[in-house]
Amino acid sequence: MVMIAYPHMRRSGARDRRFRRSALAAASLLALFSLTACGGGQDSSSGSDRPSVADIESQITKSSGDQVTEDQSACLAKTYYESDLSDEAVRLLVEAEDVSKISPEDLSKADQKASKELYEPLVKCLTPAE
């Protein structure tokens, strides 16, 4: 067996782990996002105010554990806050005990469109800095 070394193609162990961790975080948070946005049509008893960036970031940190960095969770929170998602959909992100139990059928047409537009900005937040 002939082995050819391409040092520029290899990842160091730590860098490889960071990349895998970021990829896992991206996958789990995008899944979280797609389920979270599904509450746009539901009523909520907590009023119609949009949750703050800090509230959104706190929930992302809680939900993702150590899968995302502080910078990534701040970016994600800001992206959700500034999105065209309804206040109800964003509030659902903050208030959900288990986002996997949210029904996609509850998503309003406007939130469906807004969630599609959020995919790339959310991925950008999760892309590891080189």
Image (tube, helix red, strand yellow):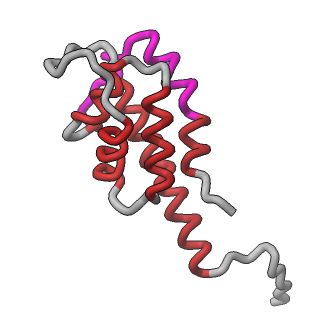
**Residue at (34%, 42%) from the top-left corner?**
54
Instruction: Locate residue 47: give its quadrant.
Output: top left
116 relative to 65 in the view: left or right: right
Residue 48, percent across and down? Answer: 26, 15
Q: In this view, does 35 lie above or below 104?
A: below
Q: Is residue 1 above or below residue 83?
A: below
Q: Between residues 117 and 91, which one lies in front from this camera angle? A: 91
Q: How many numbered marks does the figure carry? A: 0
Q: Main secondary structure of the magenta part?
A: helix
Q: Is residue 116 magenta?
A: yes
Q: Between residues 39 and 45, which one lies in front from this camera angle? A: 45
**Residue at (28%, 28%) from the top-left corner?**
92
42 relative to 121 in the view: left or right: left
Instruction: Locate residue 66: give its quadrant.
Output: bottom left
Q: Quadrant of the N terminus?
A: bottom right
Q: In which quarter of the image is the C terminus?
A: bottom right
**Residue at (46%, 18%) from the top-left corner?**
112
Say whether residue 105 is visible: no
Say whether residue 37 is visible: yes
Q: Is residue 87 above or below residue 22?
A: above
| Residue range (magenta) | 100-119
